[in-house]
Image: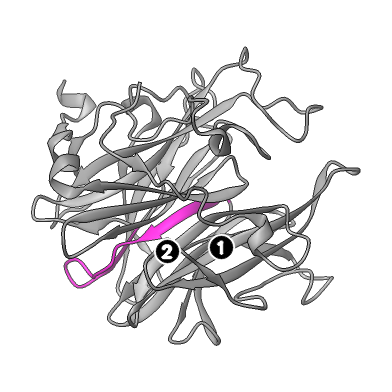
């Protein structure tokens, strides 16, 4: 059961594969921010070959909007790395962008598939035309998001490393961590933020989702949480490989000065895709998936939460900040319970 504090927008989905020129079958996992007077979206676009039952292409595109609801998709590729540029490259592709504006520059976190694992990368731009790649992790790490300002003089990020080891009594026991950097190139001071075993509605991995927003009470941060069950029979385009994971969106509140410390958590998901009233969340490449990628706090206290739905399209949900903060309950670290 999810909290009903967020209302799905009547225009959902706000970005669909048909909105993008070419043969893309999926447009999802987008990063959204306000930059130079406009809403800006960078999105992942995939092409799925229904005969081969596999993806054949991935790129990161861009769209702009005056109101955050109606989007104009710009032509061309916004950002690319990998085999299209160099077929012999160790890097295969870049995808799943998340953007944050810091000191009037746009920083983008993204995932990088390589021949030897998945890395997390960070690039910066002033115009979405020229990008400078600042850093990348070792495998395996992804779902990185950056805080919209420095804390204690450092850039800060949340991330989800995913070793194949870990707690043996839980499927994919992957957790959310914090890291800091003086220059956005070299990262350290890592701290555990949230374990997958700390979230009551998760049976598998948890991790970052959209970049945090700053409130008077703390950093309001979305998470993704996974409920995995071998008995689930969820919608998928690859029935030969059954889909058993439900992705939900949750919320935590982090300390403003020590952002690796959780001070509050919503006890239930804020968006749960287990509802036939929203078929765009249940039908697509992978059904029953919601994954936040953009979180914007407007001057009037409205929160816009953008999320990928069914790994196929982009949707929007809206709430008021005061209502959202009201569902946050004090958090006690597990070792103090």
Q: In this view, does 181 lie to the left or right of 278?
A: left
Which residue of the protein is positioned furthest toward the top in this rendering?
231
Quadrant assignment, res 296: bottom left
Q: Is mark 2 on a helix, strand or loop?
A: strand
| Residues at circles 2 and 1 in contact by the CB criterion of under 8 Å | no
Task: Specify the quadrant that holds the N terminus.
Answer: top left
Would you say 332 lies left or right of 286 here? left
Q: Name the residue under label 1.
A: 43
> Where is mark 2, residue-wise?
32
Q: Does the magenta stretch include residue 183?
A: no
Badge count: 2
Q: Is residue 131 left or right of residue 177?
A: right
Magenta stretch, residue numbers: 140-157
- Cα separation, mark 2 vs mark 1, equals 9 Å
Q: In which quarter of the image is the C terminus?
A: top left
Question: In x, y percent, where is residue 199?
Answer: 33, 27
**What percent of the width, then of the height, locates residue 185?**
42, 74
Q: How would you rate the neighbour count of disc 1 (Cα within 10 Å): few for under 14, some for 14-19, many for 20 or more?
A: many
Horizontal and vertical percent for residue 74?
Answer: 59, 77
Residue drawn at the location 20% of the way across and 44% of the way down: 253
């Amino acid at each position: 059961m999810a909290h009903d504090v967020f209302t799905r927008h009547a225009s959902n989905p706000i970005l669909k594969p048909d909105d993008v020129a070419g043969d893309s079958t999926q447009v999802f996992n987008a990063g959204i921010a306000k930059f130079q007077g406009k809403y800006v979206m960078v999105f992942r676009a995939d092409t799925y070959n229904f005969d081969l039952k596999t993806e054949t292409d991935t790129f990161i595109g861009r769209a702009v909007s005056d109101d955050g609801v109606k989007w104009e998709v710009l032509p061309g590729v916004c950002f690319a790395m990998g085999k299209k540029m160099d077929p012999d490259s160790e890097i295969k592709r870049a995808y799943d962008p998340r953007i944050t504006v810091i000191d009037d520059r746009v920083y983008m976190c993204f995932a990088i598939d390589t021949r030897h694992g998945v890395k997390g990368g960070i690039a910066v731009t002033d115009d979405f035309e020229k990008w400078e790649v600042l850093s990348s992790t070792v495998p395996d790490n992804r779902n990185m998001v950056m805080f919209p300002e420095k804390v204690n003089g450092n850039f800060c990020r949340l991330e989800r490393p995913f070793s194949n080891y870990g707690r043996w009594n839980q499927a994919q026991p992957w957790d959310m961590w914090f890291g800091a950097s003086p220059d956005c190139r070299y990262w350290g001071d890592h701290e555990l933020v949230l374990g997958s075993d700390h979230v009551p509605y998760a049976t598998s991995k948890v991790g970052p989702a959209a970049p945090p927003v700053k409130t008077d009470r703390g950093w309001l941060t979305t998470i993704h949480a996974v409920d995995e069950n071998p008995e689930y029979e969820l919608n998928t385009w690859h029935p030969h490989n059954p889909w058993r994971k439900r992705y939900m969106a949750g919320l935590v509140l982090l300390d403003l000065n020590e952002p690796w410390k959780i001070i509050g958590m919503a006890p239930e998901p804020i968006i749960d895709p287990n509802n036939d009233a929203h078929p765009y969340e249940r039908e697509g490449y992978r059904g029953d998936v919601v994954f936040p990628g953009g979180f914007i706090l407007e001057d009037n206290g409205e929160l816009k939460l953008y999320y990928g739905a069914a790994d196929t399209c982009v949707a929007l949900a809206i709430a008021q900040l005061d209502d959202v903060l009201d569902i946050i309950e004090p958090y006690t670290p597990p070792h103090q319970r």
